[in-house]
Amino acid sequence: MFNIKSLCYCFVVGSLVLGVLAVQAETTTIPSHQVIQFNHVSASYRIPVVVGVSLSQDGQQLITVGDDHKARVWDVQTGRLVRELADQADWVRTVKFRPDGEVFVTGGMDQNMYCYDARTFQRKFQFESNRCAVRAVAFSEDSERMAMVGFDNSVCVYETTYGRLHRRWTTTCTDQRCVEFSPSSHYMAAAGRDGNVRVFDTTTGAVVADLKKHIRRVNTVAFSPDGSVLATGGDDQKIHLWSMKDYKHLKELDYPSGKVTALTFCGDNLLAAGSANNKIYVWDIHTNAVPMYEMNEHQGTVAELLWDQTHKTLISCSFDTTVRFWKWEQADVAAAEASVVR
């Protein structure tokens, strides 16, 4: 029977669970709940480094790319390798599913980008040559445009039906490391070696802002799901938050150690950051400067992060040849219950 004591206990636990995101003063260490471990030895007699990852629209398949010139398709539920794709002739640096889920694209140091059917894994076409090594690609929300940056001073915008180059916009240095569309696709941010983050209006191609706070290379940018905030991270071990309303600087977060190599928003308020120190930290961008969560199981640079909103799961890939899956909801409940017991 439900008594007053039980009712009070449930009320306290529930209140703590709801409040933990806002008031947590200490960083909680989160263990991974699933790991995909590479055991495929490449021609150089070592396991390939994993530098890029993308999740299918239904969350059932994961694509990874790395330095052995291959893309691999994995079954998320079983961790089983489904297919290997070996069209690239050099290090594959990036892979992305198109938002409509119909295709995915790989790009690499051989200056080539290939589009594959997401169901059959057959190659559909090769994108028009961009004349430089490919570092990152990103899709617009409507799936009609794809942006690419690499080792030159431009952002190339392609139509995604046949892979034709549509526009080329100028950046501020010849080593661009990241590019991202805003959720509405009205804006695009690109950045690289010189620390400048250039924001474009995708309708006109006009430069609407140059965001200058980083003093070293910018490796990663991420828009919040509502498009109001842009996060940037780089070699200076800093994360900067910017308002997309007026392009004003909102906040600076000091990464505990190591170059910031990957960013992704986990909902509107939580920002995950990976680093060359092998760790991942998660902040609530509206409250404490202290990270809420730490994930420390990787043994190599965290190359990319993505957030699976459906399953509330953070996915990371690393130079340590693993892909790891992380959840913190259960950790929040356990922390709240422990507080009640004490």
Image: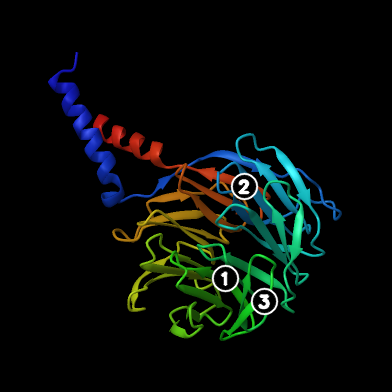
What residue appears at the point 65 percent right and 55 percent down from the top-left corner? 103
Q: Alpha-carbon neighbours of circle 1 within 10 Å: few (<14), some, or many (≥20)?
A: many
Question: Spatial distance from mark 2 to mark 3, Cα to Cα?
Answer: 32 Å
Asked which secondary structure carries label 2, the reply is: strand
Question: Which quadrant of the figure has residue 7?
Answer: top left
What residue appears at the point 56 percent right and 51 percent down from the top-left corner? 316
- In the image: residue 44, left or right of residue 178: right
- In the image: residue 231, left or right of residue 219: left
- Above/below status of 260 relative to 270: below
- Above/below status of 150 relative to 30: below
Asked which secondary structure carries label 3, the reply is: strand
In which quadrant will I find the N terminus? top left
Which residue is identified by label 1?
178
Question: Spatial distance from mark 1 to mark 2, Cα to Cα?
Answer: 21 Å
Question: Spatial distance from mark 1 to mark 3, Cα to Cα?
Answer: 18 Å
- Above/below status of 10 relative to 97: above
Report the front residue among 169 and 267. Answer: 169
The amino acid pointed to by label 3 is: Leu
Looking at the picture, how far across and down is residue 338, in whole percent? 31, 33
**Is residue 220 visible in this depiction of the protein?**
no
The amino acid pointed to by label 2 is: Val
In which quadrant will I find the C terminus? top left
Q: Alpha-carbon neighbours of circle 2 within 10 Å: few (<14), some, or many (≥20)?
A: many
Disc with the residue nearer the chain's start (2 vs 3): 3
Which residue is identified by label 2?
323
Which residue is identified by label 3?
165
The amino acid pointed to by label 1 is: Cys
